[in-house]
C-alpha cells in the first residue's frame, strides 16, 4: 500500500499499550494460517483445563498479591465445592478470604469481525474520551481515569516484573460511545458515530475479546447509553445491567475484598463499581417494575467513601455518596411495597419509614447538592430528579381506589406528587435552556415519564388553577422530550404517547366541560370495560377524591399521622437546614389547597380513548412503565407476544 493511501486508511487496534501505536503495519493479533490458528486454539484450551488443578495445587493458595494481569477466583459460599477444597487445603486460620489469585492469563485468539477492530482518528478519539471523563465519569465512576489515560497515552508505569493490563478495546469503544452521546448535540460529525461505536463494542463483548472481566462489567453499564430499539428484556438497559450484575456476582464483587490479597487499586475500583452498579440496578428495576437483581442482605461491601474514588480526578464525591444513599432508601421501600405477601399496613409502614429517611437525607444535604433555583449543575439536577421521582412513586394514589382504604392508610399524598412534578419540570426546563440535556443518563428519562403521568392526570382537575399549572408543566416537559428525542429512542416513544394527549387536553377548557368532570373518567372506563369484556374496569361512584370533605390525601391530621418526620412535615419557623425559603417551598407543598381541590381520580385513564388498557387493577402501585411498555413497543392495539 502506498504511504498516502495508508495514511487515509482506518486505523486498526494493535498490541501496543495505546491502540494507535504502530497501527500502520499491524492489523492486530492474527494467526498466519489455519494450522497456526488451530494449534493456538488447542494450546489455549489445554491451559484453560489446567486452571482449576493448578490453582488448588499452589503451595499456599492466596498468599501472594493478586496482580492486575492475573486471573481471579471467587470461591463462593460454603455450598461451593471450590470453597470447600480451598478451606480444606489452606493452612490459614481465617475463613473470611473469598478472593484468590491464579496464574497470569495467556493470550487469547478470538474470532472478531475486522470492522470491530477499527478505530477513529486519534484527534476525534481524544475529544470523545475527554467528554466522557469530564461530563460523565466524575459522577458515575465506572472507569479509573488515571489508569485508563496512562494506557491510552502510552505512558503506563507497568514493569517487566509486574505487567499491567493492556488498554481494553471493548472499554475504549464503550467510552467513545458515551462521549459521542455527550457531544452529539454540538457536533454533527459525531452524531452518526454513536451506533458505530455501539456495534463495535457489542461485537467485542459477544466475541469475549477481552480477558479481564471488569471490562465486561464496565462496558455493560456504558452500553446503556445506547438504545437501538424498544426491546426491554433481551437488550437495552435491563439486559445490560443484568449482564453487569451477573459478572459482578461471578467475580465476588458483592463481598468485601478487604481481607484478600487483591491489589489496592482493584479493591478501590471494585467498591465504587459495586455501588455504581447498585444504583443502576435500583433505577432500572424501578423503571420497569421488575425485581432487583441485587439484595444488600447478600453483600458486605463497605459503603462507598471519598477514598474509594482515588483515580478519578475532580470526582463528584458528594453526589456519588448521597445518590447511593438515596437509592438505598428507595430500594428498601420498594422491596417492602411490592412484596407479594405484604399487607396494606406493611406498605404504609414502608412509606412512612422511607419518608423519615428521605427527610433526614434531604435536611442534612451538603451544600454541594443544594438545588440552585435557576441554574442547577448536572449533578445537582440528577440528584433532585431522582429524589423527586422517588417521592412521586411513593405517594401517588393507586390507579384504582381501594374500597374502604383512606389516603392516609394507603400512604398517598397528591400534594407531594404535584410539588415533585413541578420541581422535575423546572429542572428539565433549566437544563434544556442551557443545552445540558445530553449529559443526563437514561434513568432521567424515566423521571420525565413519571412526572408526565402525574401532570397528564392533573390536567383534568376540576380546579382550574391546578389544571392550568399542570398544563404548563406538561408543555414544558413535552418540549424537553422534543429536545431529547434525537438522543434517546425512549424519549420519542414517550413523545408519541403524551403529545397527542396534551394536544387534546389543550383544546378543551375544564370550565366548559362540566359533564366531563362527573362522567368523563367513568364513561371512558365503562366503554373500555365493554370493549374488553371486563365489567370491573368501571370506577365506583364514591371513589377516592382529594377535595375537602372527602377521603383527603392532604389533610393536616392525616399528614401528621402518616409522615411523622417525613418530607411534608419539615416546615419550621426557620428554613430547613441547608435550604433557602424558596427551596424549602419546593419540598413542603407550594400548591397547598389548590392540589387538595383536585377533584379527580388518579388512574390509568390519562392515556385517552382506544388504547385498550384492559384490567387496570393489575397495574403496579409503584412504576407505571411496566404496565405501559406494550404501548411503547407497539404503537397500536396489535401486539405479538
Image: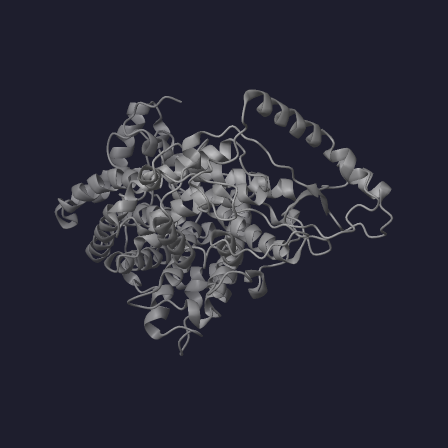
Residue 255 placement (x, y as % from top left): 67, 49
Is residue 402 among what the camera can see?
Answer: no
Count of number-bearing discs: 0
Instruction: Please say if 71 is above or below 40.
Output: below
Residue 326 placement (x, y as % from top left): 49, 58
Residue 601 placement (x, y as % from top left): 31, 45
433 vs 478, nearest the viewer? 433
Q: Is residue 455 left or right of residue 204?
A: left
Is residue 272 among what the camera can see?
Answer: yes
Q: Is residue 134 left or right of residue 331?
A: left
Residue in view at x 46 percent, y 49 percent: 410
Instruction: Please say if 594 is above or below 365.
Output: above
Instruction: Please say if 463 is above or below 119.
Output: below
Residue 461 placement (x, y as % from top left): 24, 50
Residue in view at x 37 percent, y 58 percent: 416
Quadrant containing the C terminus is top left
Q: Is residue 209 left or right of residue 177?
A: right
465 vs 248, nearest the viewer? 248
In the image, farthest residue toward the front = 2
189 vs 547, nearest the viewer? 189
568 vs 376, nearest the viewer? 376
Quadrant containing the N terminus is top left
**Quadrant assignment, res 635:** top left
Residue in view at x 65 percent, y 58 percent: 264
Amino acid at each position: 500500500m502506498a504511504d498516502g493511501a495508508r495514511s487515509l486508511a482506518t486505523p486498526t487496534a494493535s498490541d501496543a499499550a495505546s491502540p494507535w501505536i504502530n497501527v500502520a503495519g499491524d492489523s492486530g493479533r492474527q494467526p498466519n494460517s489455519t494450522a497456526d490458528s488451530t494449534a493456538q486454539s488447542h494450546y489455549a484450551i489445554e491451559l484453560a483445563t489446567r486452571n482449576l488443578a493448578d490453582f488448588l495445587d499452589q503451595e499456599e493458595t492466596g498468599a501472594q498479591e493478586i496482580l492486575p494481569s492475573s486471573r481471579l477466583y471467587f470461591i463462593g459460599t460454603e455450598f461451593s465445592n471450590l470453597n470447600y477444597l480451598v478451606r480444606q487445603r489452606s493452612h490459614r486460620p481465617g475463613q473470611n478470604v473469598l478472593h484468590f489469585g491464579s496464574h497470569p492469563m495467556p493470550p487469547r485468539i478470538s474470532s472478531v469481525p475486522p470492522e470491530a477492530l477499527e478505530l477513529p482518528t486519534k484527534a476525534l478519539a481524544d475529544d470523545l474520551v475527554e467528554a466522557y471523563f469530564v461530563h460523565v465519569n466524575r459522577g458515575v465512576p465506572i472507569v479509573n481515569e488515571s489508569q485508563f489515560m496512562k494506557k491510552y497515552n502510552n505512558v503506563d508505569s507497568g514493569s517487566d516484573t509486574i505487567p499491567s493490563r493492556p488498554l481494553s478495546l471493548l472499554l475504549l469503544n464503550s467510552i467513545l460511545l458515551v462521549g459521542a452521546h455527550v457531544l452529539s448535540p454540538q457536533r454533527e460529525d459525531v452524531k452518526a458515530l454513536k451506533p458505530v461505536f455501539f456495534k463495535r463494542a457489542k461485537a467485542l463483548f459477544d466475541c469475549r475479546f477481552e480477558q479481564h472481566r471488569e471490562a465486561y462489567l464496565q462496558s455493560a453499564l456504558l452500553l446503556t447509553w445506547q438504545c437501538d430499539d424498544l426491546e426491554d428484556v433481551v437488550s437495552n438497559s435491563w439486559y445490560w445491567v443484568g449482564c453487569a450484575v451477573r459478572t459482578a456476582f461471578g467475580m465476588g464483587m458483592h463481598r468485601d475484598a478487604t481481607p484478600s490479597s487483591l491489589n489496592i487499586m482493584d479493591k478501590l475500583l471494585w467498591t465504587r463499581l459495586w455501588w455504581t452498579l447498585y444504583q443502576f440496578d435500583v433505577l432500572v428495576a424501578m423503571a420497569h417494575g421488575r425485581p432487583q437483581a441485587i439484595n444488600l442482605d447478600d453483600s458486605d461491601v463497605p459503603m462507598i467513601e471519598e477514598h474509594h474514588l482515588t483515580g478519578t480526578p475532580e470526582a463528584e464525591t458528594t453526589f456519588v455518596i448521597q445518590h447511593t444513599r438515596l437509592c438505598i432508601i428507595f430500594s428498601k421501600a420498594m422491596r417492602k411495597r411490592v412484596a407479594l405477601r405484604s399487607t396494606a399496613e406493611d406498605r404504609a409502614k414502608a412509606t412512612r419509614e422511607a419518608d423519615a429517611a428521605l427527610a433526614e437525607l434531604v435536611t442534612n444535604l451538603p451544600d454541594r447538592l443544594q438545588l440552585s433555583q435557576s441554574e442547577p449543575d448536572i449533578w445537582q439536577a440528577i440528584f433532585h430528579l431522582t429524589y423527586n421521582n422517588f417521592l412521586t412513586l411513593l405517594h401517588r394514589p393507586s390507579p384504582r381506589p381501594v374500597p374502604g382504604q383512606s389516603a392516609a392508610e394507603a400512604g398517598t399524598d397528591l400534594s407531594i406528587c404535584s410539588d415533585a412534578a413541578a420541581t422535575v419540570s423546572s429542572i428539565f426546563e433549566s437544563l434544556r435552556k442551557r443545552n445540558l440535556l445530553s449529559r443526563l443518563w437514561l434513568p432521567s428519562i424515566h423521571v420525565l415519564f413519571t412526572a408526565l403521568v402525574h401532570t397528564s392526570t392533573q390536567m383534568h382537575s376540576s380546579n382550574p388553577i391546578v389544571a392550568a399549572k399542570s398544563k404548563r408543566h406538561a408543555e414544558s416537559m413535552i418540549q424537553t422530550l422534543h429536545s431529547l428525542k434525537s438522543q434517546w429512542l425512549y424519549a420519542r416513544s414517550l413523545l408519541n404517547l403524551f403529545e397527542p394527549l396534551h394536544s387534546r387536553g389543550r383544546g378543551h377548557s375544564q370550565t366548559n366541560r362540566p359533564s366531563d368532570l362527573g362522567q368523563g373518567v367513568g364513561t371512558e372506563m365503562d366503554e373500555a370495560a365493554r370493549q374488553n369484556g371486563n365489567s370491573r374496569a368501571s370506577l365506583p361512584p364514591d371513589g377516592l377524591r382529594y377535595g375537602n370533605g372527602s377521603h383527603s390525601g392532604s389533610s393536616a391530621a392525616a399528614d401528621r399521622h402518616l409522615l411523622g418526620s417525613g418530607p411534608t412535615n419539615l416546615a419550621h419557623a426557620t428554613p430547613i437546614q441547608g435550604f433557602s425559603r424558596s427551596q424549602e417551598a419546593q419540598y413542603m407543598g407550594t400548591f397547598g389547597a389548590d392540589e387538595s381541590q383536585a377533584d379527580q381520580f388518579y388512574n390509568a385513564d390519562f392515556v385517552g380513548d382506544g388504547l385498550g388498557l384492559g384490567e387496570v387493577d393489575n397495574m403496579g402501585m409503584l412504576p407505571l412503565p411496566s404496565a405501559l411498555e406494550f404501548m411503547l413497543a407497539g404503537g397500536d392495539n396489535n401486539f405479538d407476544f
